[in-house]
Amino acid sequence: MKEMLYAAAVLSALTFLVLVIYMIANCARTKKLKKQVALLQDEVKALKEKPAEVVIREVIKEVAPAKDQASQVEDNEDDRESARRIPFAEKMLNIDNKTQEYYEEIYNAFIACRRINPRVSSKGVSFRLGRELVAKLTIRGKTMKMHLALDVKDFEEKIFFQKDLSDVKAYEEVPFTVKVKSDRGLKNALKLVEALVEKKNIEKKTRFNRVDALEELKDVLSK
């Protein structure tokens, strides 16, 4: 009987102790929340007192690191792919349907031209005019990129969002680089192909039958 009373007393004491700890923790959280709310109110008040231009610059400054982090994620994905040495054909066959459609359109736009010869490698697809490299298609992360033998300064950056990769050895001949990840991106990419055709005086084939570019990639993997 005494042992049972002792056990009950210990249990009651432990229960009371747990309740006290919970109340203290809850109180601490409440104070912390109140402190955070107060800080936010101060920040809002400070923003109201600043000119709109200053507020915009500060917001942009805060957003920039997030964009950098997104780029870093893409770089990390690319590094992982490089480490596993996934060939371009396998990447393209396992990418989303939209990107596959974009690939089909761009691939056919190139081979509809005379003397343009495509070659699939582990890193991408190269398009040569005779021996001259005029274009490449690659995949980085989950995004397809097109590289062209064009001058980045000849096109409006706000329209095409091109990057200059002339300082990268692999793209010295085709430094003009754009991402193709939307319908608008495809439309601009096809315009750039036309610009390249005009610049290099490339003739179009009088008779051209579209090919299934994805089936060709499957053939490459099966060899």
Image (cartoon, rainbow, N blue to C red):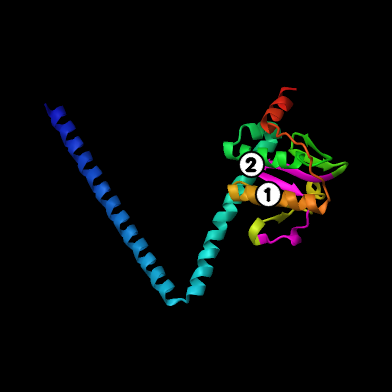
Secondary-structure class at tag 1? helix
Residue 168 shows in the view: no
Q: Is 104 on the left-hand or right-hand side of 170?
A: left
Q: Does the magenta stretch include residue 150?
A: yes
Amino acid carrying label 2: it is Tyr
Q: Which of marks 1 and 2 is nearer the N terminus?
A: 2
Q: Does the magenta stretch include residue 149?
A: yes
Q: Quadrant of residue 42?
A: bottom left
List x then y, in percent, for residue 211: 71, 32
Q: Looking at the image, how many numbered discs can be counted on the residues?
A: 2
Q: Which residue lies furthest to the top in this view?
A: 222
Name the residue beneath numbered marker 2: 102
Which of these two is toward me, 170 or 75?
A: 170
Residue in front for this viewpoint, 11 or 198: 198
Q: Is residue 113 left or right of residue 191?
A: right
Residue 143 seen from this side: yes
Question: Do labels 1 and 2 touch, CB within 8 Å?
Answer: yes
Query: Callout 1 environment at 10 Å: few (<14), some (14 to 19), or many (20+)?
Result: many
> Percent from the top left, x then y, of residue 133?
83, 44
Residue 40 sits in which quadrant? bottom left
Residue bearing mark 1: 189
Residue extent of the magenta highlight: 133-157
Residue beneath the point at 18% across and 38% down? 12
Residue drawn at x 72%, y 52% as measured from the top left: 192
On-image quarter of the N terminus: top left
